[in-house]
Image (spheres, helix red, strand yellow):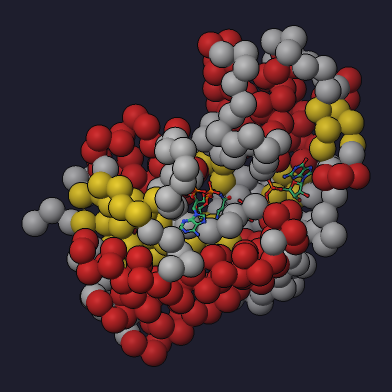
Amino acid sequence: MTKKALITGITGQDGSYLAEFLLEKGYDVYGMVRRTSTVYYERIQHIQDDLNLIQGDLSDQTSLNSAIRAIQPDEVYNLGAQSFVPTSWNQPVFTGEITALGVTRILDAIHTVKPDTRFYQASSSEMFGKVREVPQSEETPFYPRSPYGVAKVYGHWITVNYRESYDLFACSGILFNHESPRRGLEFVTRKVSFNVAKIKLGLSNELRVGNLDAQRDWGFAGDYVQAMWMMLQQDEPDDYVVATGKTHSVQRLLEVAFSTVDLDWQDYTVQDERFMRPAEVDLLVGDPAKAYTKLGWEPEVSFEALIQMMVEADIARLQKDPQHRGFTVKA
Ligand code: NAP
Ligand code: G4F
């Protein structure tokens, strides 16, 4: 029988890669989309005819119960969230509603309507925040540094709790930063790749960024969605860190991105206070040993190849359309 999967957050970066991956595996793929006055699903345009899109919202219990009842999914991937860390200081309550309580709502819909559904929760390395050890593994205690990180800790523990309370097959993937040419423009890798492309093409001459010293463990989103699926194919539900095990500073990101187009980052980069955060996560580096040994997962795309891929994709886009604004208007 053809398996059915429901993805919340299908219009986002990960949702689009996961949808492609599940379609290739032969799934019937359902995606939850929010009602908007203008319908524009740029990341899934190319596969939209193969998807079943249904309206719903993580703030609305009725819509979640109805979705589970109508679809009767074998697997649910909860990728929907307010996912941008700085926004979480401006909209902490909204972030909690969607990124934290939204997880309870979808888990409860599954528990009430179809408890044999397998569930994936998109947890985050932001939960480690002010890190208690290096590298961070499934055993590392959490110390979140933003309302987003706090909301993700709640989402993580409620997933564990529903697994232990109701015997749900619920897994939490603690994913470190993963990027792609489909990344939103507000995140630092895409902000850099997009602006490097503009500078190279003579459309701009400056890039303003915040903290250059922050270090992240950056991987490729296309690799990471495979780990999500692998978690739901195991005999037992569990939690897994998904990371490359290597970390790089924002400054190194700039060096690599500018060198891709034979430019020197120092000639174009300006540090701007506006992009500094009230509390920073200084160093993230994951230990993916459990994902490697138990799931057989390992990343394929290196940091350098990822950044090159992103810069090249942005150059191609801007050559086609110099007015291109990326996937989001907020830079
Ligand atoms: P993204 O590109 O920002 O996508 C977020 C998705 O959530 C969008 O489809 C968005 O829909 C949807 N969404 C927002 N509010 C919603 C609501 N109220 N109800 C239903 N859906 C809603 O994020 P991403 O990078 O793909 O990340 C996917 C998930 O993984 C998120 O939960 C994120 O927090 C988590 N995560 C990401 C990373 C990473 O490095 N990318 C690392 C760890 C964890 P609209 O298009 O309508 O806005
Ligand atoms: O790209 P970022 O905005 O990603 P951040 O905050 O690490 O969050 C992303 O990864 C998380 C996983 O750890 C996800 F859970 C979350 O949903 C999201 O996908 O910032 C990365 C680093 C930060 O330390 C930030 O201070 O880059 C630093 N940075 C320096 N200049 C900047 C900038 N970040 C942004 N967004 N813009 C800048 O100009």
93 left or right, relative to 105: right
168 left or right, relative to 308: left
Residue 205 horizontal/vertical position (percent):
82, 17
15 left or right, relative to 281: left
Quadrant for the N terminus in the image: bottom left
Which residue is located at x 29 percent, y 81 percent?
Answer: 112
Question: As displayed, is residue 3 above or below residue 237?
Answer: above
Which residue is located at x 23 percent, y 75 percent?
Answer: 114
Tell me, yes or no, if residue 137 can be seen here: no
Residue 167 horizontal/vertical position (percent):
32, 85
Figure quadrant of residue 142: bottom right
Q: Farthest residue toward the front? A: 37
Question: As displayed, is residue 223 above or below residue 146?
Answer: above
Residue 32 horizontal/vertical position (percent):
36, 54
Which residue is located at x 28 percent, y 63 percent?
Answer: 67
Question: As displayed, is residue 26 above or below residue 81?
Answer: above
Residue closest to the eye, 255 or 291: 255
Which residue is located at x 82 percent, y 45 percent?
Answer: 275
227 left or right, relative to 29: right
